Structures are given as C-alpha cells and as structure tokens.
Image (cartoon, helix red, strand yellow):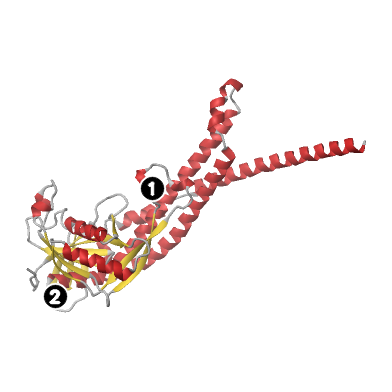
C-alpha cells in the first residue's frame, strides 16, 4: 500500500526512543532478533532494514539516574552510586517501517479524533524515531495520539528480542514521548537542504526535496536531524542526572542535620527523657560519616555531569543552528537549560563542610583526651612498679 509522495504534504513527529542492550549480548545478534520481532508483528506491513552483515550497529552510552526498585522514596544517597549508564544500539542506515493500525485500536478509551491516521511511515535509528503520516488523513492532522501506537510496537519488538526500550519524555516537567513541535513536511521538486520555520506555536514548516516514497522521505529527513537529536538526548540525560544528584545531595544533608539536631537535643533533656532521643542518635558518628560521604559524592557527580552537559550544549547549539533545527526542541530546550543553569548547591557544600569540620574537631578532642588518659594510666602503673 506504499504510495509515492510526489509532493504530497506529510506530518512528522520526533521522539527519543532508545534501544537498550541487555547484559553482554552481541550487538549484531541483538539487532537480528529485533528485526525478526518486527517482521512477526501483523501491524508492520513492511520493513526495510539494513542486513545484519552490513548494518552499522554502534554502541552509544547515555548516563541515567540510579534505578530505585519499587518506586521507593528512599534515595541512593546511602547506597554509593549516584548515576549509571545504559548502552544504546544506534543503527545506520535507519530502520524503515510502514505501519497500519485502525484508529479505533489506537485510542484505548481516548477520543478517536486525537488519532490523525491509521497509516504511518517510520524511520528509527535506535535512538531517534521519526513518525510521519499523510496530511489530510483526518480532520485533526496534529492529533496528540498520533504515533503513540508506533512506540508501543517498537517496545514490544524490543522486549520480545531480549532488549528494552527507554522512551525519553520531551522534558523534565512533561511525560509526552514526542517533541512538542510537530512538523508540516512540504516536499519540493528542487534539491534543497531541509529548512525549518515556525508555522505556529507547536507547528514547524519543513521544506525537503521530494522522494519516491514516504519511507524514503522519512529516512532522508531523519538522517538530516539525527545528530542534533542525539546531542539533545545527551543533554537531557546529563541534565536529568544532575537534577537527581542535587536532590539526593540535599536529602543527605537533611538527614545529616536531623541527626545532629537529635544529638544536640539529647544534651538538653533531663535524664528520664533521654531514652528515645538516645535511640534516635545511635551510631550517629558512623551515620554522619556516611551522609557526608554521600553528599560529597553527589556534589562530584553534579560537577562531572555539568561539565559534560556544557560541552554537549555547545555542540548542540552549533549544529542545531543550521537550517533552524533548534526549532525542533523550541518548547523543551529552554526548560532544560534553566534546570541546570539555575541550580545552586553552594548551601549544600557549605553545610557539609561545616558538619565535617565539626565531627573532625570532636574526634580530635576525643582522641587527645583518650591519649592523655592512657598516658596518665601508664605513668601511674609505671610508678607503682618502680616503687
């Protein structure tokens, strides 16, 4: 059912859909299993994927916050690691899919008017997914549910082949899996470099050279924007780790101050009222040392990732300025930048430095006193022996 575009306008939507390798599996083996899973899905009408022997399957690492099992509120601040990474499989050339799903099967109880089409042409390189459909397929060509079924298909295929899929939301304060700036793709007969311009607050106009089929058009457009999307993915991943590390560091300082407050309160209470505070402050020195170490680890994590974030931002800004590709993330990018640039951990650093110095001072006094007592005891014993 593949039809040539021949200057037919399309609608496009970009999402970050990371194919994650599990364990030490061979990249080519994992890729082969993914393609077989996609081929078995009846919703995939056709697939054009590079052969296993000739495909370029690149292992790309992205940093991520630590995993918290069972949605526990307990942070990793006492567990050591404050961030980790995932291995993404980036495929070149991109996998191309023609997908057909009736609108009524895409809504899942939602308004069917939000589904703009029952037919999608998709290009996916294992990190960035570009979902396109014909403009005019419905009365609402930019329906919010457009393309969501594609992500479900990719997720199922990944899991069936022993992989996993990590969908990166558009921004830190939103769970929508696509960038908010949709593309109205306008194919033109002459050879042009894709250029982006604003058509409205959430719509971009993109002029590209026409191709023979929608799949070829989607693939050509993805190859033009994939590096910028890859840089934005790195920017988001470092930004997310910074935010979580800052949250954990503040939580560790709060635990440390609470511990110190309970110990200070203990000394002001009458003897009969000290039992409960005494229990709360048990092991205070060991716990204080642990919280201090966790806070410093969080601060180091912030500095390390902020340095990488700054480098990535520079590359993104330079590459995305070409053809106004920065408009792809015009809704999300300012929030991501503000998330990191507005972060201030000076109070956290000052608190942990003060508490660490206080504990060291107490330990020094304690150690000096014990040495003096031991020395006096040894002297008394020596005097008795001499006498």
Q: Which residue is the extreme one toward the right?
A: 387
Could you classify mark 1 by the number of other residues whose Cα lies within 10 Å: few (under 14), some (14-19), or many (20 or more)? few
Q: Residue at x 13, y 70 (%)?
A: 214
Q: Position of residue 317 (x, y in %)?
A: 34, 66
Secondary structure of the residue carrying numbered label 2: loop
Q: Quadrant of residue 115?
A: bottom left
Q: Position of residue 3 (x, y in %)?
A: 7, 71
Q: Residue at x 57, y 25 (%)?
A: 274
Q: Nearer the viewer, residue 96 or 315?
A: 96
Is residue 369 rendered to the left or right of residue 260? right
Vertical side of 365 occupied by 162: above or below: below
Q: Nearer the viewer, residue 66 or 238?
A: 66
Disc ID at residue 211: 2
Q: Residue at x 85, y 37 (%)?
A: 381
Q: Nearer the viewer, residue 117 or 102?
A: 102
Q: Quadrant of the N terminus?
A: bottom left
Vertical side of 303 occupied by 125: above or below: below
Disc ID at residue 251: none
Is residue 362 rendered to the left or right of residue 34? right
- Residue assigned mark 1: 68
Vertical side of 2 occupied by 257: above or below: above
Q: Position of residue 64 (x, y in %)?
A: 38, 56
N-terminal label among 2 and 1: 1
Q: Residue at x 23, y 74 (%)?
A: 50
Question: Disc 2 or disc 1, which is closer to the eye?
Answer: 1
Q: How many marks?
A: 2
Q: Can residue 154 be seen?
A: yes
């Amino acid at each position: 059912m593949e039809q040539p575009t021949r200057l037919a306008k399309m609608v496009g939507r970009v999402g970050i859909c990371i194919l994650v390798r599990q364990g030490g599996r061979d990249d080519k083996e994992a890729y082969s299993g993914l393609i077989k899973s996609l081929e078995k899905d009846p919703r995939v009408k056709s697939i054009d994927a590079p052969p296993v022997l000739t495909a370029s399957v690149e292992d790309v690492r992205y940093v991520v916050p630590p995993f918290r099992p069972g949605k526990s509120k307990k942070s990793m601040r006492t567990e050591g690691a404050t961030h980790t990474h995932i291995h993404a499989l980036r495929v070149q050339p991109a996998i191309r899919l023609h997908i057909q799903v009736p609108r009524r099967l895409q809504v899942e109880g939602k308004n069917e008017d939000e589904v703009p089409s029952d037919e999608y042409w998709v290009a996916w390189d294992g990190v960035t997914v570009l979902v396109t459909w014909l403009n005019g397929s419905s009365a609402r060509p930019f329906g919010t549910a457009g393309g969501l079924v594609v992500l479900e298909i990719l997720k199922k295929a990944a899991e069936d082949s022993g992989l996993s899929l990590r969908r990166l939301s558009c921004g830190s304060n939103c769970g929508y899996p696509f960038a908010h700036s949709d593309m109205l793709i306008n194919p033109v007969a002459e050879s042009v470099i894709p250029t982006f311009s604003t058509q409205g607050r959430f719509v971009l106009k993109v002029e590209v050279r026409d191709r023979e089929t929608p799949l070829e058009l989607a693939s050509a457009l993805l190859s033009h924007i994939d590096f910028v999307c890859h840089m934005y993915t790195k920017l988001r991943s470092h930004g997310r780790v910074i935010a979580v590390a800052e949250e954990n560091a503040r939580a560790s300082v709060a635990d440390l101050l609470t511990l110190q407050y309970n110990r200070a309160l203990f000394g002001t209470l009458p003897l009969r009222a000290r039992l409960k505070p005494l229990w709360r402050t048990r092991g205070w020195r060991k716990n204080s040392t642990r919280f201090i170490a966790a806070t410093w680890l969080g601060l180091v994590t912030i500095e390390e990732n902020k340095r990488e974030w700054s480098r990535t931002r520079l590359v993104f800004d330079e590459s995305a300025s070409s053809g106004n590709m920065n408009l792809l993330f015009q809704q999300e990018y300012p929030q991501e930048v503000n998330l990191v640039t507005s972060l201030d951990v000076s109070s956290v650093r000052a608190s942990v430095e003060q508490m660490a110095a206080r504990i060291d001072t107490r330990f020094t006094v304690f150690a000096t006193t014990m040495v003096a007592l031991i020395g006096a005891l040894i002297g008394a014993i020596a005097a008795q022996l001499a006498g």
